[in-house]
Image (cartoon, grey):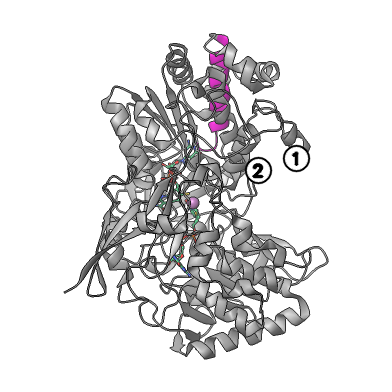
Amino acid sequence: MTTSIVRATCPHDCPDTCALLVTVEDGVATQVRGDPDHPTTAGVLCTKVSRYTERTYHKDRLLHPMKRVGRKGEGRFERISWDQALDTIAARLKAIAARDAQAILPYSYAGTMGLVQGESMASRFFNKLGASLLDRTICASAGGAGYKYTMGARIGTDVEQFQNARLILIWGGNPIASNLHFWMRAQEAKRRGAKLIAIDPYRSLTAEKCHQHIALLPGTDAALALGMMHVLIRENLVDEDYIARYTHGYDALRERAAEWTPQRTAETCGISVEEVEQLARDYGALARQGEPVAIRINYGLQRVRGGGMAVRNITCLPALVGAWRHAAGGVQLSSSDTFPKNSAALQRPDLLKKQVRTLNMSTIGDALLEEASAEFGPKVEAVIVYNSNPVAVAPESPKVARGFAREDLFTVVLEHFQTDTADHADILLPATTQLEHTDIHATYGHLYMMANNPAIAPLGEAKPNTEIFRLLAQRMGFDDACFYESDDELAAQAFNAKDARAIHFDWDSLKRKGWQKLNAPDAPFAEGGFATPSGKCEFYSERMKADGLDPLPSYIPPYESRASNPELAKRYPLAMISPPARNFLNSTFVNVQSLRDTEGEPHLDMHPVDAAQRGIEEGNQVRIFNDRGSFIAKVRVTDKAREGLVVGLSIWWRKFAADGKNANEVTSQRLTDMGNAPTFYDVLVQVEKV
Ligand SMILES: Nc1nc2c(c(=O)[nH]1)N[C@H]1C(S)=C(S)[C@@H](COP(=O)(O)OP(=O)(O)OC[C@H]3O[C@@H](n4cnc5c(=O)[nH]c(N)nc54)[C@H](O)[C@@H]3O)O[C@H]1N2
Ligand SMILES: Nc1nc2c(c(=O)[nH]1)N[C@H]1C(S)=C(S)[C@@H](COP(=O)(O)OP(=O)(O)OC[C@H]3O[C@@H](n4cnc5c(=O)[nH]c(N)nc54)[C@H](O)[C@@H]3O)O[C@H]1N2
Ligand SMILES: [Mo]
């Protein structure tokens, strides 16, 4: 028997991007382990990815191309050859492009975070074709925009520094489920005496393990940050020297913060005055003593109308107290912009020869149901989906499913499995998994560039996304040299190896070593250096003003809450959130039996008072509904959900639920204040026993 160990990288949409060691015995991957030498992975994998071989060799893997034989959405297919599949697609796309290529829409997200199997050959293909562009907003664009207005770029505290912090605010995240290797650092900080505070409407697994849990109302984080500013300024807990040197607009901020008394803040957030004051004092007093105080902002707080502003306001706090002076102080939202990525080389926007429209992935339901018009442009006639499962994950799924069920829509899906979206394909193509292809990864939670070497040969007739688009390009007659580049050539172009941050490695050495840390300063903003127009941390932002936003931190209430929409709340009095379940990765892994068994079935967590009012008991099946739709789940009566809030951990495949629906039946397509992102957690519902 021949055994080898291959260096790989976890491809999933998670900040941790772990270094993997894959054991291969006679061409079969038998084990996937975390690399013990990689500092952030530290030899530890989550339950999901330690089952990666179970997913790769799953009996339901798609192994050859197929064409639809049943009704649209029915999910009945018959095997065809690659030639037949590619010829059919090329003929159809050519016919549409002859009228207007903008009627063709690519739809993709982060099924793999790899820069090669993500947006490289695929983007080249759609640019050359002149298809509609896709605004990839479904996850992080609200907070990203708020952070960039304030800080200039998505650069923050290194995850490897958090164990040295004396106070950590875990704000709108559940790292035990979704950022495990940050949680390991936070645990170490706790052992060294740090205080951990979770700010989350739900008593998540993480909130249960923190010293304190502040259970504010969903969508009110921006107000809490303003209340903290009020107390910090009132009690002189700010760092005047840091403010004078490295921030812009303090006087205006002080006036704004003066409006946010602890009383007003507490009422807005549904918490006590003491909680507001104590939080500010804990944070400001430690900073004043010269101790590092750190904030981890995650995604929970961004998925509401004012999600961008919430991130912006929180991001002002470290500059106010001078927390950036320490490597272990400051804030981490994302490390994305520390990476010297070269997206233009991979995606080749220069191949796009004329101005085309951009459609937002978060409103795909409306886009697919829209008729041609001067304003909208041509009706969408074809969708090519890769690295995503929109029928399950996009908001307001009654409309998404109706759109994908259009008999006149030509749909191609590149997938590992027959997902809810794949059920709607006309042509279904088998894609390789991370064990079967080459890739290179930047991350959003640590500072290592990562390589993925293929461990095994493609299963069945599966092909990498890149290869599928290369073959399609040939069929379309695209003969530019860039359509012939190999995955290795693409990986070598993915980052600028001359950039000072990456000067010590190239693709060849990265492939051999598996990972390399970027050169980046330990305390990135200890002496200012913000990439904003003023070069400072911008409490006041001219750019926000120019974009029609309040230039100062402010509070934008949710679209749907008891306070902001009392009329709607009469019919739908409960706020609903649907954050990730621990054993799923968005909708990936829901079909892995051992993981689905652990999650059981779709649940709804409900406070005892809300349950009693509705005659609902533990274990009852309930219907969750509003004007957009309804779905069914099994109730867990628990005070983990604060009163007035229900929580449905997600994202279930529709077809695994009793009624063939999931939480996105009731979410809306309304967008955030910045970044055009979805508002998954800005939802009112009613619940009744079935
Ligand atoms: N196991 C697992 N890991 C994942 C994922 C997964 O699906 N499963 N998904 C990956 C992806 S794509 C992403 S974007 C990240 C997400 O990473 P996180 O943002 O850490 O996501 P969650 O674990 O859902 O944590 C969100 C928390 O925010 C809380 N929350 C909801 N609304 C609000 C609010 O208005 N204010 C505040 N303060 N909190 C609120 C929720 O109750 C929840 O506990 O995780 C990644 N990692
Ligand atoms: N209600 C609700 N909805 C949500 C969220 C929520 O918290 N609540 N979270 C939102 C967030 S944060 C996100 S990021 C989105 C995530 O939405 P998506 O990005 O659509 O993520 P997944 O559901 O994991 O689907 C990814 C698909 O890509 C496939 N895939 C993986 N690798 C490859 C590959 O190499 N090639 C091809 N062709 N396919 C591949 C996988 O098999 C999987 O089916 O969902 C959003 N939707
Ligand atoms: Mo996400």
Q: Type of residue at label 2?
A: Met
Number of residues whose C-alpha sits closer than 10 Å to that of mark 2, classed few (under 14), some (14–19) or many (20 or more): many
The kind of secondary structure element at disc 2 is loop
Location of residue 397 (image quadrant): bottom right
Calculate the distance from the C-alpha at mark 1 to the C-alpha at mark 2: 9 Å
Q: Main secondary structure of the magenta part?
A: helix
Residue sitting at 58 percent across and 26 percent down? Answer: 316
Q: Type of residue at label 1?
A: Asp
Q: Which residue is mark 1?
A: 547
Q: Nearer the viewer, residue 156 or 350?
A: 350
Quadrant into which the N terminus falls: bottom left
Q: How many marks?
A: 2
Quadrant into which the C terminus falls: bottom left
Q: Are marks 1 and 2 in contact (CB under 8 Å)?
A: yes
Q: Position of residue 663 (x, y in %)?
A: 47, 56
Q: Position of residue 546 (x, y in %)?
A: 78, 37
Number of residues whose C-alpha sits closer than 10 Å to that of mark 1, classed few (under 14), some (14–19) or many (20 or more): few
- Disc 1 under 8 Å from ligand 1? The reply is no
Q: Nearer the viewer, residue 144 or 657?
A: 144
Q: Which residues lie in the magenta part?
A: 218-234
Q: Residue furthest left?
A: 1
Q: Nearer the viewer, residue 430 or 628?
A: 430
Q: Position of residue 267 (x, y in %)?
A: 54, 24
